[in-house]
Each structure stands twice: as C-alpha cells, then as structure tokens.
Image: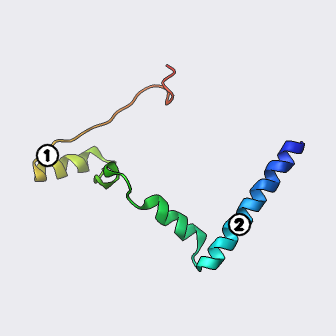
Amino acid sequence: MRTLLVRAGTLAVAFAAVASLSAQDGLDPFKKLHGELTSAKEPWQTIPWHLSILDARAEAAKEKKPVYLLARAGHPLGCV
C-alpha cells in the first residue's frame, strides 16, 4: 500500500512538472507531445504505408514498384 502511495505521489509530481513546463512554453501539452510522436525521425517512417492491400497494389501498379506485404500469424510475443 505504501509503494502505491509513493508511486501515485511521484506521478502527481511528474504531471505537475509537465503542466508547469507547458504553461511556460505557451503550448498545449497534447499538441506538443503529438508533434513529437508524429514527426518522422526514422527512414522507415517516411514510407507511404497503406492499410489496404488493394490501395497499395493500385499505387504500385501506377508507379511500377513492388508491394511489400508483412503478414503475421500466432501470438504477438512469438509464444505459439
């Protein structure tokens, strides 16, 4: 029970620190975090991924490029 209170206190201090920093920056903390998470930092993040194989196939046919399909089966941790 005591560790739960310590963790809750630590979390409250962290939220207060983030709130004070965002108030100083004049930015909404959600917008700032969203911008950091959605900005492309790795080369693979610049690839125009498609969720639909039909859309990917149509674009690949127009650009005469291959389609890379990643399909997985089984448990996400590999414990099958």
> Which residue is painted at 49% across and 30% down in the image?
76
Q: Which residue is mark 2?
A: 17
Q: Which residue is mark 1?
A: 65
x and y, in percent, of residue 61 in the image:
12, 48
Query: Label 1 is placed on what type of residue?
Result: Lys
| Residue reaching furthest to the right | 2
Distance from disc 1 to disc 2, alpha carbons, whole Å, reads 49 Å
Q: Nearer the viewer, residue 48 or 40?
A: 40
Query: Label 2 is placed on what type of residue?
Result: Ala
Does residue 75 appear left or right of residue 41 in this picture? right
> Which residue is painted at 59% across and 77% down in the image?
25
Q: Does dot 1 land on a helix, a strand or a loop?
A: loop
Does residue 57 appear left or right of residue 18 in this picture? left
Does residue 73 appear left or right of residue 3 in this picture? left
Q: Does dot 2 land on a helix, a strand or a loop?
A: helix
Q: Residue 4, labelled with which disc?
A: none
Q: Nearer the viewer, residue 53 or 60?
A: 60
Q: Nearer the viewer, residue 76 or 51?
A: 76
x and y, in percent, of residue 30 in the image:
57, 67
x and y, in percent, of residue 44 in the image:
32, 48
